[in-house]
Image (tube, coloured by chain):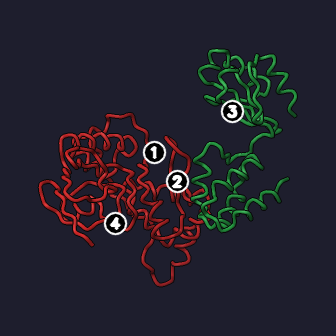
Amino acid sequence: MSEIVLNIDGKEVAASAGMTVLQAAQQADIHIPTLCHHEKLEAYGGCRLCIVEVEARGRKSYVVSCLYPVEPGIVVRTRSEKVDKIRKVLVEELMAHAPDAPELVRLAEEYGADRHRFDKETSFCVLCGLCVRYCDEVKHKNAVGFIENGAVREISFIPEIAAKECWSCQECFTLCPTSYAQAAYLLTEALAFPGRREAHSHAHAHATPEPERRVIPITPVAATA
Amino acid sequence: MCEQKIDAIIEKYRGQPGSLIHALVEIQHENHWLPREVLQRLADALEVSFSQVMQIASFYKTFSLTPKGRHEVHVCSGMTCHLRGAAKLLARVEEITGLKAGETDADSRFTLETGACLGSCSIAPELIVDGKHYGRMTPDQAEAVLKSYE
């Protein structure tokens, strides 16, 4: 593997060909905020929060670092006035959907985003695709998928698959930045195969206690007015 | 009604995940809508997960996940048609069929849709029934046209 040297925030960083700018930065302990990125999953480029300024051959451009491959000699700036402004607006837009998502609240503080800037569109899902991609790429179950398109796009659990697979997994719940994956699952469960929870606790009332696989408690986030 | 035809389409593409959209288009064309059981069978045959089939079937407006009428009526709401009286035409078509745009009647005779632009501005305002274009439509002519479809 050939070594590629690039400059990130004034630091010379060595990376191998085929890596993305985000990976190179993470390797060098340079923090770039992400929402839809997960190391086990293929890069998605959905949230755009990892946007950085790249200067290559004398030209500046703004690219999402999770998809941008490293090139020799490029100069990357992870924070600049314009990058921060783009991120601020992105957070504001995402907050129209999930105003109290912990990660967004934290990012809003960092970038000075105003959670009331855009009218609320409380879908609670920011369409990061983590649950959908995790279920597909890691678990190979495809119990949850996207449906519809454009403004009405949403995640949807397939009842037939969810009834069989989700109970013993529930791994996407912790990935979700907004807890919406869990809510969507519970709604599907309530509508399509109710009684699962009761049956489970009855069956295991006297048996050896197995590790509790119920619902992940959500720590309430203080509302940031 | 066309179970065999649907099965034939599914068989034709068996084991070819890349042909999902082709299969969906053909089934939609044959059956006018995509029932859930058919999508399930298609997913199994093409070795594509059901959620991915749903993702594609719900993404494109070509595909319908609810039953459609025997005849699909489109009234163009594009700029040119609008200027040449599409609103009156649509109002009349709605009155005749008893439907609002996007609806299907109980006898599944008609499904009414609007769209912009349907691409025949030179013959505006335009009415399309089952892919047949009727240009320079007046509300009265529309009534005669729709009567010829059972």
Write down the residue under mark 2: A146
Write down the residue under mark 4: A39
Q: Chain of mark 3?
A: B
Q: Element type at marker 1?
A: loop
Give the camera-side residue of A186 and A159: A159
Q: Element type at marker 4?
A: loop
Report the residue at 73% width, 52% height from top: B27
Image coordinates for residue A126, horizontal then vertical, percent: 41, 49
Give the camera-side residue of A71 and A76: A71
The amino acid at mark 2 is: Phe
Above or below B52: residue A203: below
Disc 1 and disc 3: Cα gap in Å? 27 Å
Image coordinates for residue A122, horizontal then vertical, percent: 43, 42
Report the residue at 50% width, 49% height from top: A154
* Circles 4, 3 touching at the beta carbon (< 8 Å): no
Q: Chain of mark 4?
A: A
Q: Colour of chain B?
A: green
Nearer the observer, disc 1 or disc 3? 3
Above or below A139: residue A100: above
Report the residue at 30% width, 45% height from top: A223
* Chain drawn in red: A
The amino acid at mark 3 is: Glu
Check chain identity for marks 2 and 4: say if they share one: yes
Write down the residue under mark 1: A123
The amino acid at mark 4 is: Glu
Nearer the observer, disc 2 or disc 4? 4
Image coordinates for residue A81, horizontal then vertical, percent: 18, 40
Disc 2 and disc 4: Cα gap in Å? 21 Å
User: On residue B113, which mark appears?
Assistant: 3
